[in-house]
Image (cartoon, rainbow, N blue to C red):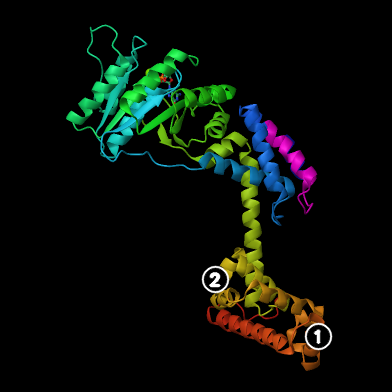
Amino acid sequence: LSDRLTSVLQNLRSKGRLTDADIDSTAREIRIALLEADVALPVVRAFIAQIKERAKGAEVSAALNPAQQVVKIVNEELISILGGETRRLNFAKHPPTVIMLAGLQGSGKTTLAGKLARWLREQSHAPLLVACDLQRPNAVTQLQVVGERAGVPVYAPEPGNGVGDPVDVARRAIEEAKRAQHDVVIVDTAGRLGVDEELMKQAADIRDAVQPDETLFVVDAMIGQDAVTTAEAFRDGVGFSGVVLTKLDGDARGGAALSVRHVTGQPIMFASNGEKLEDFDAFHPDRMASRILGMGDVLSLIESATKVFDEQQAQEAAEKLTAGQLTLEDFLEQMLAVRKMGPIGNLLGMLPGGAQMKEAAANIDDKHLDRLQAIIRGMTPAERADPKIINASRRARIATGSGVRVAEVNDLVNRFFEARKMMQQMAGRFGFGGGGGGMS
Ligand code: GDP
Ligand code: MG
């Protein structure tokens, strides 16, 4: 894929503008990348449509070619969708906070229960783990092992009482938590291999019994295309307030993340990336976006191209300023740049005299700026490059040509000379090597 994309990038290099054809050809590559990452097809379609819309309205970047620009937009959009509303766990006003875990069998709920418990304990909480998976013979023991590793107690039905009722266990666990002053209760539930009505009913009954503050949908990142139907089933059957993506240590590209997010709109809160309890992290949208796109090399190329371009622009501006070669054209450009707070604007802020320039620009409204632009456009190239030659008769001609009063032309020219003088003085004082006015 990388090779193919690189060739698209080369074909498009040095064209200045984002055309529909540019967008379409890059969108095709993006579509393949997303499908390869196992993003569900309807989600891919919706996402591509969204991207095309955004790319069409995009400002043309001088640092990137069109294909790179589209990829940049895609990456930003992915990060924003995946990150949308990353948020912390909701804690209850009146403890205990109840966190219920739901998801298919093998998705990693029990493992996650241990990870969450350990993580919360490290933050000085006193969690209680609750074994509500009474379906599988070893499920309770598994949670007890995990609890022991996490150093967190486990509430489980008494052994030898036959198969208990998970709803009953959940209810009694909350009482126990209150009695023993646990401020967080983590409820591990049963899962099936596929979506199953009985399972959903049980999960919904447990939910009604414990009234969770958070219900986390635990989903295996390797689930691929099935992510959509599974997420929809849990959304409708139990409902959830957040998503945890597991098994990110595997080689799945993680398209499930985008699918689940797209279908349910719920935030992805945590990432599980291994079997050990410490293999657990907050979810990072930027890393996930890059993983889904699978264009790490292209993304870093884009990043460095943008950076190099910014640096070049800044460098050129700095050289002109300190060499006293500032022209009226630069002056106008910089006013515009400062207003946009672009790279030159930031640079100006740091340069001696730049602060004044920033202030000057801040006092200029758009209409005024248009007039300044008109005045400067009304000058000959020679006048713009060397404003010293702008004498009285030239001023009168410029004023008439650009439809302003002579006083406005005077004002602009004076302001320009002031700015230039100030910058040269400051540059000299701060040792910017401004002395060599002979620099090209
Ligand atoms: P549950 O059925 O939803 O409770 O899932 P489990 O917690 O029992 O996990 C099922 C299997 O997946 C176990 O063998 C876990 O060790 C493994 N597992 C869980 N989370 C991860 C993970 O993030 N990475 C890896 N590699 N394995 C995991
Ligand atoms: Mg389990």
Farthest-out residue, left: 179
Up/down of 145 relative to 119, above or below: above
Helix, strand or loop at mark 1:
helix
**Residue 190 located within the stretch drawn in magenta:** no
Q: Amino acid at mark 2?
A: Gly
Looking at the image, can residue 170 be seen?
Answer: yes
Q: Earlier in the sequence, mark 2 or mark 1?
A: 2
Left or right: 237, with 42 as reference point? left
Farthest-out residue, bottom: 392
Residue linked to disc 2: 349
The one nearer the camera, 338 or 324, is 338
Q: Residue at x 33, y 11 (%)?
A: 138
The picture quadrant where one finds residue 241 is top left
Magenta residue span = 11-32
Q: Amino acid at mark 1?
A: Thr
Up/down of 308 relative to 217, above or below: below
Up/down of 16 relative to 285, above or below: below
Q: Residue at x 75, y 80 (%)?
A: 375
Up/down of 392 relative to 213, above or below: below
Residue 177 percent coordinates (x, y): 22, 28
The one nearer the camera, 50 or 122, is 50
The one nearer the camera, 199 or 323, is 199
Residue 186 percent coordinates (x, y): 32, 28
Looking at the image, can residue 7 be seen?
Answer: no
Residue linked to disc 1: 400
- The quarter of the rendering in which ligand 2 is drawn is top left
**Residue 13 located within the stretch drawn in magenta:** yes
Q: Nearer the viewer, mark 2 or mark 1?
A: 1
